[in-house]
Image (cartoon, coloured by chain):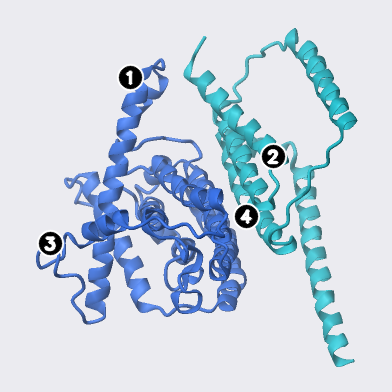
Chain colours: A cyan, B blue
Amino acid sequence: MLTGEFIAFMALALVAIIGGVLLINLTKVIHMVVALVFTFVSIAGIFVILSAEFIAAVQILIYSGAITIIMLFGIMLTRHDDTSEPITGKWRKLFLLLGVLGFGVAVYIGIYNLDIPQAANTLHVDNTEQIGISLYSHFIIPFELTSVLLLVALIGAIVLAKKDEDDEKEAEKE
Amino acid sequence: MIEDLLYSSPGWTNVGIFFLLGAALLMVVLGFVTYAILAERKVMGFMQLRHGPNQVGGRWGLLQTVADVLKLLLKEDTIPKLADRPLFILAPIIAFAPAFMVLATIPFTDRFQFADIGVGLLYYIAISGLTTIGIVTGGWASNNKYALLGGMRAAAQMVSYEIPLVMSVVGVILLAGSLNLNEIVEAQRSGWFIILQPIGFIVFLIASVAELNRAPFDLPEAESELVAGFHVEYSGFRWAFFMLAEYVYFFAMASLTTVLFLGGWLPLPFLGFIPGAVWFALKFSLVIFILIWFRVTFPRIRADQLMEFGWKVLLPVALANIFITAIVKQLFFM
Protein backbone atom coordinates (compact mmCIF):
# COMPACT_ATOMS: atom_id res chain seq x y z
CA MET A 1 0.00 0.00 0.00
CA LEU A 2 1.49 3.29 -1.10
CA THR A 3 0.88 5.92 1.54
CA GLY A 4 2.54 9.28 1.97
CA GLU A 5 4.26 7.98 5.08
CA PHE A 6 5.75 5.07 3.12
CA ILE A 7 7.05 7.34 0.35
CA ALA A 8 8.56 9.72 2.90
CA PHE A 9 10.15 6.81 4.78
CA MET A 10 11.63 5.33 1.60
CA ALA A 11 13.05 8.70 0.51
CA LEU A 12 14.57 9.43 3.92
CA ALA A 13 15.91 5.89 4.35
CA LEU A 14 17.51 6.02 0.89
CA VAL A 15 19.18 9.35 1.65
CA ALA A 16 20.39 8.03 5.02
CA ILE A 17 21.88 4.88 3.50
CA ILE A 18 23.40 6.70 0.52
CA GLY A 19 24.93 9.22 2.93
CA GLY A 20 26.41 6.37 4.97
CA VAL A 21 27.81 4.61 1.91
CA LEU A 22 29.31 7.85 0.60
CA LEU A 23 30.82 8.50 4.04
CA ILE A 24 32.77 5.26 3.69
CA ASN A 25 33.57 5.53 -0.01
CA LEU A 26 34.54 9.17 -0.48
CA THR A 27 38.21 10.01 -0.17
CA LYS A 28 38.32 13.62 1.08
CA VAL A 29 37.61 14.36 4.72
CA ILE A 30 35.24 17.28 4.12
CA HIS A 31 33.22 15.32 1.55
CA MET A 32 32.75 12.56 4.14
CA VAL A 33 31.54 15.07 6.72
CA VAL A 34 29.02 16.55 4.29
CA ALA A 35 27.76 13.03 3.51
CA LEU A 36 27.35 12.52 7.25
CA VAL A 37 25.14 15.63 7.42
CA PHE A 38 22.68 14.06 4.99
CA THR A 39 22.56 10.83 7.02
CA PHE A 40 21.88 12.65 10.30
CA VAL A 41 19.24 14.97 8.85
CA SER A 42 17.35 12.13 7.19
CA ILE A 43 17.44 10.11 10.42
CA ALA A 44 15.89 13.15 12.10
CA GLY A 45 13.23 13.03 9.36
CA ILE A 46 12.52 9.38 10.23
CA PHE A 47 12.07 10.41 13.88
CA VAL A 48 9.48 12.96 12.68
CA ILE A 49 7.61 10.20 10.83
CA LEU A 50 7.56 8.23 14.09
CA SER A 51 6.00 11.38 15.65
CA ALA A 52 8.99 11.93 17.94
CA GLU A 53 9.48 15.61 17.03
CA PHE A 54 11.44 16.39 20.17
CA ILE A 55 14.09 13.74 19.44
CA ALA A 56 14.25 14.91 15.82
CA ALA A 57 14.82 18.55 16.81
CA VAL A 58 17.43 17.58 19.41
CA GLN A 59 19.16 15.27 16.91
CA ILE A 60 19.59 18.16 14.46
CA LEU A 61 20.42 20.68 17.21
CA ILE A 62 23.23 18.54 18.64
CA TYR A 63 24.62 17.13 15.41
CA SER A 64 24.63 20.35 13.37
CA GLY A 65 26.98 21.90 15.94
CA ALA A 66 28.96 18.67 16.28
CA ILE A 67 29.39 18.26 12.53
CA THR A 68 30.57 21.85 12.18
CA ILE A 69 33.22 21.12 14.81
CA ILE A 70 34.21 17.82 13.13
CA MET A 71 34.55 19.76 9.90
CA LEU A 72 36.88 22.28 11.56
CA PHE A 73 38.95 19.43 13.00
CA GLY A 74 39.00 17.88 9.55
CA ILE A 75 40.27 21.14 8.07
CA MET A 76 42.81 21.90 10.77
CA LEU A 77 44.19 18.50 11.73
CA THR A 78 44.54 16.88 8.32
CA ARG A 79 46.59 17.81 5.30
CA HIS A 80 44.73 20.01 2.86
CA ASP A 81 44.81 17.69 -0.15
CA ASP A 82 45.12 14.40 1.71
CA THR A 83 43.21 11.45 0.36
CA SER A 84 43.00 7.99 1.84
CA GLU A 85 44.30 5.30 -0.48
CA PRO A 86 42.01 2.38 -1.21
CA ILE A 87 43.37 -0.92 0.05
CA THR A 88 42.64 -3.65 -2.43
CA GLY A 89 43.18 -7.38 -2.43
CA LYS A 90 41.44 -10.11 -4.35
CA TRP A 91 40.89 -12.50 -1.43
CA ARG A 92 40.00 -9.70 0.90
CA LYS A 93 37.26 -8.52 -1.44
CA LEU A 94 35.88 -12.05 -1.81
CA PHE A 95 35.75 -12.59 1.94
CA LEU A 96 34.12 -9.22 2.42
CA LEU A 97 31.44 -10.08 -0.14
CA LEU A 98 30.78 -13.41 1.59
CA GLY A 99 30.62 -11.70 4.96
CA VAL A 100 28.17 -9.08 3.74
CA LEU A 101 25.97 -11.70 2.05
CA GLY A 102 26.02 -13.91 5.15
CA PHE A 103 25.07 -11.00 7.36
CA GLY A 104 22.30 -10.01 4.98
CA VAL A 105 20.84 -13.52 4.90
CA ALA A 106 21.06 -13.87 8.68
CA VAL A 107 19.31 -10.56 9.27
CA TYR A 108 16.67 -11.34 6.64
CA ILE A 109 15.86 -14.71 8.21
CA GLY A 110 15.84 -13.16 11.66
CA ILE A 111 13.62 -10.22 10.79
CA TYR A 112 11.22 -11.67 8.23
CA ASN A 113 9.03 -13.59 10.62
CA LEU A 114 9.67 -11.47 13.65
CA ASP A 115 6.40 -10.60 15.29
CA ILE A 116 6.48 -7.64 17.65
CA PRO A 117 3.12 -7.42 19.41
CA GLN A 118 1.81 -3.88 19.11
CA ALA A 119 0.95 -2.63 22.55
CA ALA A 120 -1.47 0.26 22.63
CA ASN A 121 0.35 3.28 24.01
CA THR A 122 0.04 7.03 24.18
CA LEU A 123 3.70 7.78 23.50
CA HIS A 124 2.95 9.92 20.46
CA VAL A 125 0.75 12.34 22.43
CA ASP A 126 2.65 15.23 24.05
CA ASN A 127 5.85 13.23 23.92
CA THR A 128 8.01 16.23 24.83
CA GLU A 129 6.12 16.52 28.10
CA GLN A 130 6.36 12.77 28.70
CA ILE A 131 10.12 12.78 28.09
CA GLY A 132 10.49 15.69 30.50
CA ILE A 133 8.43 14.05 33.22
CA SER A 134 10.19 10.69 33.05
CA LEU A 135 13.63 12.31 32.77
CA TYR A 136 13.12 14.52 35.81
CA SER A 137 11.19 12.09 38.03
CA HIS A 138 11.97 8.42 37.27
CA PHE A 139 15.48 8.85 35.88
CA ILE A 140 16.66 11.91 37.79
CA ILE A 141 19.76 10.27 39.33
CA PRO A 142 21.22 8.85 36.08
CA PHE A 143 20.42 12.17 34.37
CA GLU A 144 22.24 14.22 37.00
CA LEU A 145 25.18 11.77 36.99
CA THR A 146 25.49 12.18 33.22
CA SER A 147 25.62 15.95 33.59
CA VAL A 148 28.33 15.60 36.27
CA LEU A 149 30.28 13.34 33.89
CA LEU A 150 30.05 15.94 31.14
CA LEU A 151 31.15 18.67 33.54
CA VAL A 152 34.17 16.58 34.58
CA ALA A 153 35.10 16.06 30.93
CA LEU A 154 34.75 19.79 30.27
CA ILE A 155 36.95 20.75 33.24
CA GLY A 156 39.44 18.04 32.26
CA ALA A 157 39.71 19.51 28.77
CA ILE A 158 40.28 23.00 30.21
CA VAL A 159 42.95 21.68 32.61
CA LEU A 160 44.76 19.90 29.77
CA ALA A 161 44.66 22.98 27.56
CA LYS A 162 45.78 25.27 30.39
CA LYS A 163 48.74 23.04 31.32
CA ASP A 164 50.13 23.20 27.79
CA GLU A 165 50.11 26.98 27.89
CA ASP A 166 52.06 27.07 31.20
CA ASP A 167 54.61 24.61 29.83
CA GLU A 168 55.09 26.77 26.78
CA LYS A 169 55.66 29.84 28.95
CA GLU A 170 58.27 27.97 31.02
CA ALA A 171 59.89 26.75 27.85
CA GLU A 172 60.04 30.32 26.58
CA LYS A 173 61.65 31.50 29.85
CA GLU A 174 64.27 28.83 29.67
CA MET B 1 -6.71 24.39 6.30
CA ILE B 2 -3.19 22.99 6.42
CA GLU B 3 -4.23 20.69 9.26
CA ASP B 4 -7.04 19.20 7.14
CA LEU B 5 -4.64 18.72 4.24
CA LEU B 6 -2.10 16.96 6.46
CA TYR B 7 -4.65 14.44 7.71
CA SER B 8 -6.35 13.80 4.35
CA SER B 9 -5.29 10.84 2.21
CA PRO B 10 -2.23 11.57 0.07
CA GLY B 11 -2.52 12.23 -3.63
CA TRP B 12 -1.20 14.34 -6.45
CA THR B 13 -3.70 17.12 -5.63
CA ASN B 14 -2.16 17.50 -2.19
CA VAL B 15 1.34 17.53 -3.63
CA GLY B 16 0.23 20.27 -6.02
CA ILE B 17 -1.42 22.32 -3.26
CA PHE B 18 1.63 22.07 -1.01
CA PHE B 19 3.91 22.96 -3.90
CA LEU B 20 1.81 26.02 -4.76
CA LEU B 21 1.66 27.13 -1.12
CA GLY B 22 5.43 26.76 -0.81
CA ALA B 23 5.98 28.67 -4.05
CA ALA B 24 3.61 31.42 -2.88
CA LEU B 25 5.49 31.78 0.41
CA LEU B 26 8.78 31.87 -1.50
CA MET B 27 7.42 34.70 -3.65
CA VAL B 28 6.28 36.62 -0.55
CA VAL B 29 9.72 36.14 1.00
CA LEU B 30 11.47 37.26 -2.19
CA GLY B 31 9.27 40.37 -2.26
CA PHE B 32 10.15 41.04 1.36
CA VAL B 33 13.87 40.55 0.69
CA THR B 34 13.74 42.98 -2.25
CA TYR B 35 12.20 45.74 -0.19
CA ALA B 36 14.12 44.90 3.00
CA ILE B 37 17.36 45.56 1.13
CA LEU B 38 15.96 48.83 -0.20
CA ALA B 39 14.69 49.81 3.25
CA GLU B 40 18.05 48.98 4.77
CA ARG B 41 19.90 51.12 2.22
CA LYS B 42 17.45 53.98 2.61
CA VAL B 43 17.52 53.95 6.44
CA MET B 44 21.31 53.65 6.42
CA GLY B 45 21.44 56.55 3.96
CA PHE B 46 19.25 58.80 6.09
CA MET B 47 21.18 57.93 9.26
CA GLN B 48 24.45 58.77 7.51
CA LEU B 49 23.03 62.04 6.09
CA ARG B 50 22.90 60.87 2.48
CA HIS B 51 20.04 60.03 0.13
CA GLY B 52 20.43 56.33 -0.54
CA PRO B 53 19.10 54.85 -3.80
CA ASN B 54 17.02 57.48 -5.64
CA GLN B 55 17.52 56.91 -9.37
CA VAL B 56 15.91 53.65 -10.54
CA GLY B 57 12.13 53.52 -10.07
CA GLY B 58 11.24 57.02 -9.00
CA ARG B 59 12.36 59.26 -6.16
CA TRP B 60 12.39 56.40 -3.61
CA GLY B 61 14.46 54.05 -5.77
CA LEU B 62 11.70 51.44 -5.69
CA LEU B 63 13.16 49.35 -8.51
CA GLN B 64 16.81 49.59 -7.45
CA THR B 65 16.96 46.10 -5.87
CA VAL B 66 15.09 44.56 -8.79
CA ALA B 67 17.73 45.97 -11.13
CA ASP B 68 20.51 44.71 -8.86
CA VAL B 69 19.05 41.20 -8.76
CA LEU B 70 18.64 41.15 -12.55
CA LYS B 71 22.26 42.16 -12.89
CA LEU B 72 23.30 39.35 -10.54
CA LEU B 73 21.33 36.75 -12.49
CA LEU B 74 22.88 37.85 -15.80
CA LYS B 75 26.44 37.72 -14.46
CA GLU B 76 28.87 35.05 -15.60
CA ASP B 77 28.89 32.05 -13.29
CA THR B 78 32.52 31.62 -12.26
CA ILE B 79 33.89 28.61 -10.39
CA PRO B 80 37.59 28.87 -9.50
CA LYS B 81 39.74 26.26 -11.21
CA LEU B 82 41.22 24.89 -7.98
CA ALA B 83 37.95 24.98 -6.05
CA ASP B 84 36.36 21.79 -4.78
CA ARG B 85 33.70 21.78 -7.50
CA PRO B 86 30.88 19.60 -6.06
CA LEU B 87 31.06 21.24 -2.64
CA PHE B 88 31.33 24.70 -4.19
CA ILE B 89 28.02 24.09 -5.96
CA LEU B 90 26.38 22.39 -2.99
CA ALA B 91 27.32 24.97 -0.32
CA PRO B 92 24.86 27.80 -1.27
CA ILE B 93 22.04 25.25 -1.36
CA ILE B 94 22.92 23.86 2.10
CA ALA B 95 23.02 27.43 3.37
CA PHE B 96 19.70 28.50 1.84
CA ALA B 97 17.42 25.46 2.29
CA PRO B 98 17.27 25.62 6.14
CA ALA B 99 16.55 29.37 5.97
CA PHE B 100 13.37 28.63 4.05
CA MET B 101 12.46 25.52 6.09
CA VAL B 102 12.52 27.59 9.26
CA LEU B 103 9.65 29.81 8.05
CA ALA B 104 7.20 26.90 8.10
CA THR B 105 6.62 26.98 11.86
CA ILE B 106 6.26 30.70 12.41
CA PRO B 107 2.66 31.73 13.21
CA PHE B 108 2.06 35.01 11.38
CA THR B 109 -1.52 35.25 12.63
CA ASP B 110 -3.76 32.80 14.48
CA ARG B 111 -4.84 31.29 11.12
CA PHE B 112 -1.84 31.86 8.86
CA GLN B 113 0.76 29.24 9.74
CA PHE B 114 2.13 26.36 7.71
CA ALA B 115 3.09 23.79 10.33
CA ASP B 116 1.88 23.79 13.93
CA ILE B 117 4.69 21.67 15.40
CA GLY B 118 4.67 20.86 19.12
CA VAL B 119 8.34 21.80 19.44
CA GLY B 120 8.23 24.77 17.05
CA LEU B 121 10.76 26.89 18.92
CA LEU B 122 13.28 24.06 19.17
CA TYR B 123 12.71 23.26 15.48
CA TYR B 124 13.59 26.83 14.53
CA ILE B 125 16.82 26.85 16.55
CA ALA B 126 17.86 23.37 15.40
CA ILE B 127 17.27 23.92 11.68
CA SER B 128 18.90 27.35 11.65
CA GLY B 129 22.12 25.73 12.90
CA LEU B 130 22.40 23.77 9.63
CA THR B 131 23.22 26.94 7.68
CA THR B 132 26.61 27.13 9.41
CA ILE B 133 27.56 23.86 7.73
CA GLY B 134 26.79 25.44 4.34
CA ILE B 135 28.91 28.49 5.19
CA VAL B 136 31.91 26.45 6.40
CA THR B 137 31.59 24.16 3.37
CA GLY B 138 31.52 27.17 1.05
CA GLY B 139 34.52 28.70 2.79
CA TRP B 140 36.52 25.49 2.48
CA ALA B 141 35.45 24.65 -1.07
CA SER B 142 36.57 28.06 -2.37
CA ASN B 143 40.21 27.08 -1.75
CA ASN B 144 40.99 30.62 -0.65
CA LYS B 145 42.55 31.64 2.67
CA TYR B 146 40.17 34.55 3.26
CA ALA B 147 37.16 32.37 2.54
CA LEU B 148 38.44 29.65 4.88
CA LEU B 149 39.08 32.16 7.67
CA GLY B 150 35.60 33.61 7.19
CA GLY B 151 34.05 30.15 7.30
CA MET B 152 35.92 29.21 10.47
CA ARG B 153 34.92 32.48 12.12
CA ALA B 154 31.32 31.80 11.17
CA ALA B 155 31.50 28.36 12.80
CA ALA B 156 33.06 29.67 16.02
CA GLN B 157 30.61 32.55 16.24
CA MET B 158 27.47 30.59 15.51
CA VAL B 159 28.32 27.75 17.88
CA SER B 160 29.18 30.22 20.68
CA TYR B 161 26.13 32.44 20.27
CA GLU B 162 23.63 29.63 19.79
CA ILE B 163 24.04 28.75 23.48
CA PRO B 164 23.03 32.16 24.94
CA LEU B 165 20.26 32.32 22.32
CA VAL B 166 18.76 29.03 23.54
CA MET B 167 19.33 29.91 27.20
CA SER B 168 17.62 33.30 26.84
CA VAL B 169 14.41 31.74 25.50
CA VAL B 170 14.29 29.16 28.32
CA GLY B 171 12.77 31.91 30.50
CA VAL B 172 9.98 32.38 27.94
CA ILE B 173 9.45 28.61 27.77
CA LEU B 174 9.23 28.42 31.57
CA LEU B 175 6.58 31.14 31.73
CA ALA B 176 4.57 29.87 28.75
CA GLY B 177 4.95 26.21 29.74
CA SER B 178 5.25 25.16 26.11
CA LEU B 179 7.62 24.98 23.16
CA ASN B 180 4.77 25.53 20.72
CA LEU B 181 4.90 29.00 19.18
CA ASN B 182 1.08 29.32 19.10
CA GLU B 183 0.83 28.55 22.80
CA ILE B 184 3.67 30.99 23.54
CA VAL B 185 1.69 33.75 21.81
CA GLU B 186 -1.51 32.75 23.64
CA ALA B 187 0.36 32.88 26.96
CA GLN B 188 1.09 36.57 26.30
CA ARG B 189 -2.57 37.65 26.51
CA SER B 190 -2.02 38.92 30.05
CA GLY B 191 1.30 40.62 29.26
CA TRP B 192 3.96 40.49 26.59
CA PHE B 193 7.12 38.63 27.52
CA ILE B 194 9.24 41.72 26.86
CA ILE B 195 7.78 43.08 30.14
CA LEU B 196 8.10 39.81 32.07
CA GLN B 197 11.49 38.88 30.56
CA PRO B 198 13.45 42.11 29.96
CA ILE B 199 16.86 40.49 30.56
CA GLY B 200 15.97 37.53 28.38
CA PHE B 201 14.86 39.90 25.62
CA ILE B 202 18.13 41.86 25.63
CA VAL B 203 20.26 38.69 25.61
CA PHE B 204 18.08 37.26 22.84
CA LEU B 205 18.36 40.42 20.74
CA ILE B 206 22.16 40.53 21.00
CA ALA B 207 22.57 36.81 20.34
CA SER B 208 20.16 36.99 17.39
CA VAL B 209 22.19 39.79 15.76
CA ALA B 210 25.27 37.57 16.18
CA GLU B 211 23.43 34.57 14.70
CA LEU B 212 22.37 36.70 11.73
CA ASN B 213 26.02 37.66 11.07
CA ARG B 214 25.08 41.31 10.94
CA ALA B 215 27.10 44.30 12.14
CA PRO B 216 28.45 44.66 14.84
CA PHE B 217 28.94 40.87 14.68
CA ASP B 218 29.63 40.49 10.94
CA LEU B 219 33.10 39.03 11.41
CA PRO B 220 32.64 36.12 8.98
CA GLU B 221 32.38 38.62 6.13
CA ALA B 222 34.35 41.52 7.60
CA GLU B 223 35.21 43.33 4.39
CA SER B 224 38.05 45.39 5.87
CA GLU B 225 39.91 42.28 7.10
CA LEU B 226 38.83 39.34 4.97
CA VAL B 227 37.85 41.00 1.65
CA ALA B 228 34.40 39.42 1.77
CA GLY B 229 34.83 36.47 4.12
CA PHE B 230 33.35 33.11 3.19
CA HIS B 231 31.85 34.26 -0.13
CA VAL B 232 34.96 35.86 -1.69
CA GLU B 233 35.00 33.43 -4.59
CA TYR B 234 31.27 33.37 -5.18
CA SER B 235 29.64 35.53 -7.82
CA GLY B 236 26.40 35.81 -9.73
CA PHE B 237 23.44 33.75 -8.55
CA ARG B 238 25.48 31.55 -6.19
CA TRP B 239 26.47 34.67 -4.26
CA ALA B 240 22.85 35.80 -4.47
CA PHE B 241 21.86 32.55 -2.74
CA PHE B 242 24.08 33.32 0.27
CA MET B 243 22.67 36.86 0.44
CA LEU B 244 19.15 35.50 0.09
CA ALA B 245 19.75 33.05 2.95
CA GLU B 246 20.99 35.93 5.09
CA TYR B 247 17.93 38.09 4.41
CA VAL B 248 15.48 35.20 4.81
CA TYR B 249 17.01 34.65 8.26
CA PHE B 250 16.58 38.37 8.85
CA PHE B 251 12.87 37.91 8.08
CA ALA B 252 12.61 34.75 10.19
CA MET B 253 14.51 36.12 13.18
CA ALA B 254 12.44 39.32 13.24
CA SER B 255 9.27 37.18 13.10
CA LEU B 256 10.55 34.96 15.91
CA THR B 257 11.40 37.97 18.08
CA THR B 258 7.88 39.30 17.48
CA VAL B 259 6.31 35.96 18.37
CA LEU B 260 8.42 35.29 21.47
CA PHE B 261 8.63 38.69 23.10
CA LEU B 262 6.21 41.14 21.45
CA GLY B 263 3.05 39.07 21.61
CA GLY B 264 2.87 38.00 17.96
CA TRP B 265 -0.47 38.98 16.43
CA LEU B 266 -2.01 40.07 19.76
CA PRO B 267 -3.23 43.71 19.81
CA LEU B 268 -2.51 46.35 22.41
CA PRO B 269 -5.37 46.86 24.91
CA PHE B 270 -8.41 48.74 23.51
CA LEU B 271 -7.09 48.44 19.95
CA GLY B 272 -8.46 44.95 19.26
CA PHE B 273 -10.47 46.16 16.24
CA ILE B 274 -7.28 46.29 14.14
CA PRO B 275 -6.70 42.83 12.62
CA GLY B 276 -3.91 40.57 13.89
CA ALA B 277 -2.00 40.59 10.62
CA VAL B 278 -1.56 44.37 10.86
CA TRP B 279 -0.30 44.10 14.43
CA PHE B 280 2.15 41.42 13.43
CA ALA B 281 3.39 43.52 10.50
CA LEU B 282 3.81 46.60 12.71
CA LYS B 283 5.80 44.81 15.41
CA PHE B 284 7.80 42.95 12.78
CA SER B 285 8.72 46.22 11.03
CA LEU B 286 9.76 47.71 14.36
CA VAL B 287 12.18 44.81 14.98
CA ILE B 288 13.54 45.11 11.42
CA PHE B 289 14.09 48.84 11.94
CA ILE B 290 15.94 48.24 15.23
CA LEU B 291 18.20 45.66 13.58
CA ILE B 292 19.04 48.10 10.74
CA TRP B 293 19.63 50.80 13.35
CA PHE B 294 22.13 48.49 15.12
CA ARG B 295 23.98 47.95 11.88
CA VAL B 296 24.39 51.67 11.23
CA THR B 297 25.26 52.62 14.79
CA PHE B 298 27.74 50.08 16.17
CA PRO B 299 31.32 49.53 15.02
CA ARG B 300 32.43 45.94 14.37
CA ILE B 301 33.97 44.24 17.39
CA ARG B 302 37.21 42.23 17.39
CA ALA B 303 37.20 38.43 17.17
CA ASP B 304 38.56 37.94 20.71
CA GLN B 305 36.09 40.48 22.13
CA LEU B 306 33.32 38.60 20.38
CA MET B 307 34.22 35.28 22.04
CA GLU B 308 34.78 36.87 25.44
CA PHE B 309 31.46 38.72 25.29
CA GLY B 310 29.57 35.59 24.31
CA TRP B 311 31.01 33.24 26.91
CA LYS B 312 31.80 35.56 29.82
CA VAL B 313 28.89 38.04 29.68
CA LEU B 314 25.90 36.74 27.71
CA LEU B 315 25.98 33.12 28.92
CA PRO B 316 26.17 33.89 32.69
CA VAL B 317 23.51 36.59 32.33
CA ALA B 318 21.24 34.17 30.46
CA LEU B 319 21.79 31.46 33.13
CA ALA B 320 21.02 33.96 35.90
CA ASN B 321 17.87 34.93 34.02
CA ILE B 322 16.71 31.28 33.98
CA PHE B 323 17.35 31.02 37.74
CA ILE B 324 15.45 34.23 38.53
CA THR B 325 12.58 33.28 36.21
CA ALA B 326 12.23 29.88 37.91
CA ILE B 327 12.08 31.53 41.36
CA VAL B 328 9.59 34.17 40.17
CA LYS B 329 7.42 31.51 38.61
CA GLN B 330 7.43 29.43 41.82
CA LEU B 331 6.55 32.45 43.96
CA PHE B 332 3.96 34.30 41.89
CA PHE B 333 2.60 32.16 39.06
CA MET B 334 2.03 28.76 40.61
Q: Is residue B170 above or below residue B309?
A: above
Q: Is residue A35 above or below residue B322?
A: above
Q: Residues within 10 Å of mark 4 (few under 14, many from 20)?
A: many
Disc 3 is placed on an element classified as loop
Disc 3 marks which residue?
B57
Disc 4 marks which residue?
A68
Labelled disc at residue A165? none
Residue B241 drawn at (x, y percent): 40, 53
Q: Marks 2 and 3: which is nearer the front? A: 3
Q: CA distance from mark 4 to mark 1?
A: 39 Å
Q: Amino acid at mark 2?
A: Leu
Disc 1 marks which residue?
B13
Mark positioned earlier in the residue sequence (4 or 2): 4
Asked if the residue at tag 2 contacts the one at tag 1, i.e. Cβ–Cβ closer than 8 Å, the answer is: no
Dividing the picture into quadrants, the one containing residue A119 is top right
> Tag 2, which chain?
A
Residue B304 drawn at (x, y percent): 60, 77
> Tag 1, which chain?
B
Q: Amino acid at mark 1?
A: Thr
Q: Identify which residue is drawn at 78% across, 19% down.
A: A104
